[in-house]
């Protein structure tokens, strides 16, 4: 393992770009937010009403739906329980991101 250049890492003779991983993770949080918004609206909640129901400040909840923040596992459970859905209904497809992170 070694550092190749700023923002890159050599691991098992492959060069991984940190900026590429960051872009992929940004896409992942945006896709999560879009699915979360879709499910919230499907259940008939306003953004403000749902945030209050779940116990999350509306501004922070809005950031989740816009894909601007990562969330804790505890928060994911709270959201899924409040929406009465499985994780798979609000999480982007794993296989889509598996290839992008390799």
Image (cartoon, rainbow, N blue to C red):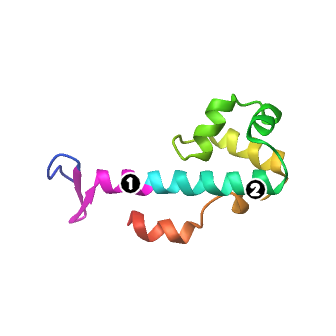
- Looking at the picture, how far across and down is residue 9, in whole percent? 23, 53
Label drawn at residue 40: none
Which quadrant of the rendered structure holds the C terminus?
Answer: bottom left
Frontmost residue, 37 versus 100:
37
Label drawn at residue 23: 1
- Looking at the picture, how far across and down is residue 71, in whole percent? 59, 41
- Looking at the picture, how far across and down is residue 57, in whole percent? 69, 28
Circles 1 and 2, Cβ within 8 Å, touching? The answer is no
User: Label 2 crowding class (10 Å Cα cut-off): few <14, some 14-19, many 20+?
Assistant: some
Q: Residue at x 54, y 42 (%)?
A: 70
Q: Which residue is mark 2?
A: 39
Compare marks 1 and 2 and give the one earlier in the sequence. 1
User: Which residue ends up furthest to the left in the rendered image?
Assistant: 5
Mark pair 1, 2: CA separation: 24 Å
Is 19 a magenta residue? Answer: yes
Q: Which residues are magenta?
A: 8-24
Q: Residue at x 53, y 40 (%)?
A: 69
- Looking at the picture, how far across and down is residue 101, in whole percent? 40, 63
Q: Secondary structure at mark 2?
A: helix
């Amino acid at each position: 393992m070694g550092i190749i250049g700023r923002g890159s890492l050599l691991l098992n003779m492959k060069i991984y770009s940190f900026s590429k991983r960051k872009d992929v993770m940004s896409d992942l949080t945006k896709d999560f937010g879009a699915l979360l918004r879709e499910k919230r609206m499907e259940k008939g909640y306003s953004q403000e009403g749902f945030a209050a129901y779940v116990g999350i400040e509306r501004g922070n909840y809005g950031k989740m739906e816009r894909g601007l923040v990562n969330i804790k596992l505890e928060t994911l459970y709270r959201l899924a329980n409040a929406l009465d859905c499985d994780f798979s209904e609000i999480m982007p497809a794993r296989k889509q991101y598996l290839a992008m992170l390799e």
